[in-house]
Amino acid sequence: MKIHEYQAKQVFASYGIPVPKGGVAATPAEAKQIAKDLGDKVVIKAQAYAGGRGKAGGIKTASTPDEAEQLAGQIIGMRLVTHQTSPEGVPVDRVLVEEAAAIERELYLSIIIDSAAGSPVIMASEAGGMDIEEVAAKTPEKIIKAYVDPVTGFQTFLGRRIAYSLNLEPDLIRPATQLVGSLFRAFKEKDCSLVEINPLIVTSDKRLLALDAKMNFDDNGLFRHKDYAELRDPKQEDALELEASEHNISYIKLDGDVGCMVNGAGLAMATMDIIKQMGAEPANFLDVGGGASEEMVAKAFSIMLSDPKVKAALVNIFGGILRCDIVAKGMIAASKQLDIKIPMVVRMRGTNVQEGMQLLADSGLPVILAKDLKEAAEKVVAARKN
Amino acid sequence: MSILVDENTRLLVQGITGSEGSFHTRRCIEYGTKVVAGVTPGKGGSSFDSVPVFNTVEQAVRETGANASMIFVPPAFAAEAILEAAEADLTPVACITDGIPTLDMVMVMKYLKGRKTRVIGPNCPGVISPGKCKVGIMPGDVHMPGEVGVASRSGTLTYEAVAQLTELGIGQSTCIGVGGDPIIGTTPVDVLQLFEKDPGTKMVVLIGEIGGVAEQNAAEFIKQMTKPVVAFICGATAPPGRRMGHAGAIITGSSGTAKEKIAALTAAGATVAPSPAEIGVTAKKVLESKA
């Protein structure tokens, strides 16, 4: 789960991590007031779940409160299109108005889970403010890594190692060590999958400041943090994707016109792959999940079909933990509420397949049956053309 | 021969009385797995079908001689369930549970270091040695005893691959789904190492997906293997930067793409199936060329 920069900065501040003074504004007038209160040059930053905001015109500097009002007016209401968003972009309905900091150095600091090492890793670099993946690819020696043992937890020496490796001046070693420790505490207590400060700056008056803030929560940890529900900004997510996630269904909208509903992420991706190999484009990724109920299948089925681009659909189920009869019942229940005009190919195998096929046959649903994956893909691509 | 589970496996099921636990325990028993005990705290002393249920793993092991475990405990308690199984030295421990917080698994993996227990998963279908023992949620009837080992990061795509093999008359020694989470107890490389050493396995089918470096690591090991490997990587059409259901399946940079993984596997000498519908036929061709 993602949250906005201003929300991440509020979390940072609650952990004692220094962030710029500022406030969030939903209107140009509010932006003007915040700029007036700050009383100096300000930076106006579009709040959106996307990197690359600066290049897309989502970050501007204003010298006066009036200019802040005018620039905020340009940014609020825009759709921000960056390399990380869909071509339609994401809406911006808030800006963060902050004091413009005098930057002396730009550093990088983040914490993620290293899957291979099986532990959290703190990463830092003197090459802050840049695309860190590029830095890591071209000059891996510029990335400092410190692994945190889950038993002992964060130790001050790890923070010191990072601070000294960043070649900070003596007066900043202690604050930097503390900052790294605080960031790790936030990462752990908030069940994050990522925290990132890029850039972490040294100001001209020798202070550390988190100029940007990114915080992603581990979706598997959300049950421990009921309060995160109010941090969610549904407008940043595709309406269908959001509806799906509320029902624990993984759905991702794509650009093609062949809808697919599959159980299991791997088989869902393989189904998309074979649709493409047969010369069509998948309209979505949809994994109904292992423990899906009849209601979840019905929901997934209607979500897949509610994308107006879908010209034909493929249901590919290999029952394991999910039983084919549950899938059939869900499809039948959903189709009673829907007026299905597109051709539908169904391929089922595995747990309770006989029961599932019988239910579909008895229901009178106009489905095209396929015996295997290849035939299913061929039939759905052919049906789409008719 | 086979790896990890066989006719000597005496299985304990943690969370045996839940809806998924009970459904799949019955399927395992039908398949012929020796399910000797169940654990559900608070239900000790009762029985599930004819399987005795205990309050703790320790007591279940003491009274039944269970030596392996299958876990269906809900995500909030599953990490602790793994620790309880590891404390009793059960191995393997197949954790089927999906949704365990990553930081809980970090702690579990640290605890497992130096211990006897091998964890499979979490968020996985489990492990099956066809004709001998099924420890997991995979449909038993698509499998067939034989000499091809199957290692996969996926659940249902594994069943797909296995069904293709079986339809062509190619049996399997053992099939393992390692799980889709960022932190897993057994990696594809671990499974390849076990298959390489198993005299009952002649060839390995490896099913991978986008995200991470598990397949690149597997490719490094394949270079040293004496047995042929057939691979398939799903997710070539997945858009970058999006999570495709599995937390592991995120393309975060150039290192996680299907293209790069396929290149690494091919360079290591593996034969990569061109389509998910051709995993079986590719395996058949490779088997015939080596015969």
Image (cartoon, rainbow, N blue to C red):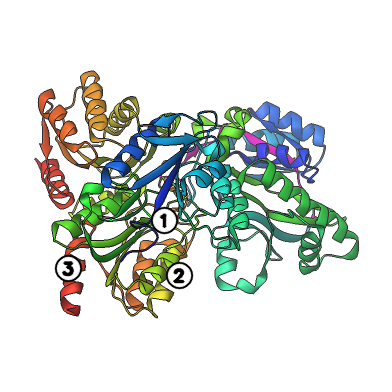
Residue type highlighted by circle 2: Asn
Which numbered disc covers residue B284?
3
**Image point 75% across, 37% down: which residue?**
A22
Residue B77 against residue B109 in the figure, above or below: above
**Image point 28% across, 31% down: which residue?**
A301
Circle 2 Cα neighbour tier, 10 Å, few/some/many (<14 / 14–19 / ≥20): some
Mark 1 lies on residue:
B178
Residue type highlighted by circle 3: Lys
Q: Kindly report which numbered mark, 1 or 2, lies closer to the viewer in this rendering.
A: 1
For this orientation, the residue located farthest to the front is B63
Front-most of residues A83 and B98: B98
Circle 3 Cα neighbour tier, 10 Å, few/some/many (<14 / 14–19 / ≥20): some
Which of the chains bears the disc numbered 1?
A: B
Residue A191 image position (x, y, % from top left): 63, 42
Residue B67 image position (x, y, % from top left): 46, 52
Residue B59 image position (x, y, % from top left): 55, 42
Residue A216 is at least partly visible in this image: yes
Co-location on one chain, circles 1 and 2: yes
Front-most of residues B285 and B248: B285
Residue type highlighted by circle 1: Val
Q: Earlier in the sequence, mark 1 or mark 2?
A: 1
Front-most of residues A45 and B182: B182
Co-location on one chain, circles 3 and 2: yes
Residue range (magenta):
A85-103
Co-location on one chain, circles 3 and 1: yes
